[in-house]
Every structure is written in structure tokens, then in C-alpha cells.
Image (cartoon, rainbow, N blue to C red):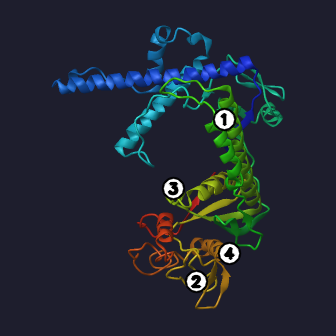
Amino acid sequence: MRVVQAYRFALDPTARQAAVLASHCGAVRVAFNWGLAQVKANLAQREAERSYGIADDLLTPALSWSMYSLRKRWNQVKDEVAPWWAGNSKEAYACGLARLADALANWRDSRQGTRKGPKVGFPRFKAKRRAARSVRFTTGTIRLDGHTHVVLPVLGRLKTHEPVGKLARLLAGGGARIASATVRWQEGRWHVSFTVHTERAVAAPARPDAVIGVDLGINTLAVFSDGRPPVANPRHLDAAARRLRRLSRAVSRKRGPDRRTRQRPSKRWLRANAARNRAEYRVAALRRDGIHRLTTGLARTYGTIVVEDLHVAGMIRNRRLARAISDAGFGEIRRQLAYKTGWNGGRLIVASRWFPSSKTCSSCQAVKAKLPLRMRAYVCEGCGLTLDRDVNAALNLASLVERTVAGSGPETENGRGADRKTPPGGAGGREASTPHRTLTARIRRGPSPTTGESLRILETQ
């Protein structure tokens, strides 16, 4: 199948090349800010004319927000606005204007209600010290040179910190084509990411007919329905918290930058801040590596994987659980499973967040009215089943495939695990007796559902 895949490599540029990379990222910021200033001036002029009672058809013509129009206008005035523009690739300025066009389109669609997700604000100017440093190349010389170098427009030949032989062999065989390259300052060093269009053979999982339910949690990261050992939550951030506190105190004792007085940071502050950043980057790298190992193993083994549709954005609003939930990476686990199951010939089924996986007995399907979070064992009053609540939830997720996909329809009349209306305390009753635990349960469930749909299958191919 034809897929779009990214390959990221760390770079080892020379001091001169690093300066040129920083200059390109600055050019992106300059073009973005110039275009935004033009748009805001045009909007302010039209608004002022309206306040004077001028008819709409006589107002100053509206400035087009398309990338083509912005780039055409930039080419007309670039000699005056940025006389040094020739020192950077034209792709840097095009990248900044393209990002501005996308930001304006997102704001307009969000304001009109045609864009999903939270409301998007109007674009703001990019500050020199706070803006992310990155530049994207879509034309020009973009290729690999051997197994340890890449070639980019104007930048020339850059050495990579790691070998690029895998991508080089794929390109040499004619099975892939580089569409673009993005250079970004990330995790304390420069990285280059290649967006590649390639043909990927769909593999078959080791157990194509096997179904596994995966219950995610904080105490234990993942519990499975087939009896395999659970995956412990490594809690990388908690493990590094003591070191991060010490490094942060060291940074606070040094003379740092001050925007109000234009004070530049001292050399000691820069070294202390770099040490703190390296510790934070290590936490992110360990978390990413663990999640990749978990999701790759599941996608290569099982034909059908069932997970819950957790309302992560709502769960992290609880200040008591926000750090632990963010450190676990629930959203990243689901995102990786979505595309890795497609690559390996499997499927990912996402159970509705209204499905009471923890409150349902995996043996007799009886549903408890409430199950406090402090009760870690599920005890069924009907059949006498006693089981760990996370294992019970994983079993219910696995059985959800047979009960719904087989054609039997929703589990109950309303599809939420209980044939009654939602009580004032939220779906499924009160999750706990204490106020803060009840708040946690409500945040996890979110607002009342408008449909009885119990699951959906993600199309990843």
C-alpha cells in the first residue's frame, strides 16, 4: 500500500552550518511576521473605513490570505523589507508564508464553525526567543549523500549523527520518493525529517485471529485480556523529578535573560539551562521508546486490538492526576496503534468512552451501579467472580468485539451498560465517595452522550 512515512535523523553540523540553519529559521519567522503585519494592517484599514460609514463595495480591497498571493506580494517588496534575503533559500520565506496562510485558514474555519476541535485564536507574531526554530524545504536539491550525509538547498552537505542507510537503500530501489525535508532544533540539537512517499507491503500479524483487550491505567500502564504479564508504568518523570528540581534550582541561581531590561543570559546560565534541558529530553526519549516497544509488539502479534476512547483532554484538567496521566502517554499509545495496526494487517477497535468496562462483570455481564476507584478488585454479587478490576476491564474490551461486531447490537437498551437514564452524578453512578474522586470520574467520562454507539473501527488503510 502507498503510505506517507517520515524518517528523522539527528545532525552534526559544523559551527558555520549551525549558524546558517539558525539564519534560515529566522527567515521563516521574519516572513511570517511580515505577512501577519500586512494582514492586520489591511483588516484595521477596512474596519476604520467602515466606522466612517463607507459602503462595503468602496472599502480598501481585502488582502488575499492564500499562500500564493502572500508569496507574490513578498517577492515584490523583499528587496526593501529584507535586503539580506539572498543569503537564505527561498524555501525559508515560502515556509513562513505557508504557515501563516494555514494559521489564518484555521482561524477563519474555526470562527465559522467548520473546523473541528477547540477554538483557534487569531495568529500572533512570533518572538525571536520563544518561536520554535524549524524550516521546511519542498523544492531544490534534497537527497542523501552516502550513508552519513544529507544534502539540502543552500545548506549543502550536512553530516548526520546516525546512519541513513535504510532510507538510502529504499530510495535506491525506486520504492520511495522524498517529498519534503524539515530541519528543526529539537531536544538540544538539530534534526532533519524527510517526508517520504513509499510503497509498504502489508504484513500479517503473528496471530491474525486473536483478539486482545488493552486497559490503560496509571498504576499499571497496560493490562491485557489474554493473560500476558501487564506492562508496568515506568513513571519516567517521577524518576527524574529529583534531578530536575536540582538542575532547576541551579538555573535559578544564575543570571538569566530578562526581556524587560534586555539583559542577556550569562554563560553559566546557558550551561545550567542546557543541562536541565538534556535531563528533560532524556525523559521524553525514554517515554517514546517504551511506547514504541509496547505498540509495535501488539501490532505485530494480534489481529484485533481493542482499547478505550479515553477523554485525555478532560482527564488532565484534574490537577491531582494531570502529571501522571501526561507522563503515561495514553493518547500517544492510541495514535501509534492506529497506524501500526494498518501497517501490520490488523485492525484497531476503539470502545466508546461510555462503555462501562470496569463496572461490568466479564462472566455474567452484570453492571454495578458504582465502583469506587479505591476498590482494585472486582467482586460480582451475581456469580461471585473475584478479579482484578483492570483485568476484568480488559476482558470486557476483548468480548466487546464478539457482542457488537457479530451483529448482536449494543449491550443494553441505551448502549451504555445500564438500562436506565443517566443520573445527575454522571453516567454509571458515582465513581467514588470522596468529592475529588467524583470530580476525577466526571472528567474522565465527559458530557452526556448523544448516541448509543458502543465502538467504532478505525480505518487505517
Q: Which mark is residue 399?
A: none
Q: Quarter of the image holding residue 225? A: bottom right
Separation of residues labelled 1 and 3 (CA atoms): 30 Å
Q: Which mark is residue 273?
A: 1
Q: Are marks 1 and 2 in contact (CB under 8 Å)?
A: no
Q: Please identify, in this view, whether the residue under mark 2 or under mark 3 is nearer the observer.
A: 3
Q: Answer whether residue 279 is visible to the viewer in this image.
A: yes
In this rendering, the answer to whether 279 lies above or below 352 is above
User: Circle 2 sits on which residue?
Assistant: 365
How packed is label 4: few (under 14 Cα within 10 Å), some, or many (20 or more)? many
Separation of residues labelled 3 and 4 (CA atoms): 25 Å
Q: Please identify, in this view, whether the residue under mark 2 or under mark 4 is nearer the observer.
A: 4
Q: Please identify, in this view, whether the residue under mark 1 or under mark 4 is nearer the observer.
A: 1
How packed is label 2: few (under 14 Cα within 10 Å), some, or many (20 or more)? some
Q: Are marks 3 and 4 in contact (CB under 8 Å)?
A: no
**Which residue type carries mark 4?**
Val
Separation of residues labelled 2 and 4 (CA atoms): 14 Å
- Which of the marked residues, 2 or 4, is nearer the chain's N terminus? 2
Mark 2 residue element: loop
Separation of residues labelled 1 and 2 (CA atoms): 55 Å
Q: Are marks 1 and 3 in contact (CB under 8 Å)?
A: no
Which residue of the protein is positioned furthest toward the left in this rendering?
A: 53
Mark 1 residue element: helix
Residue nearer the viewer, 70 or 423? 423
Count the labels in the image: 4
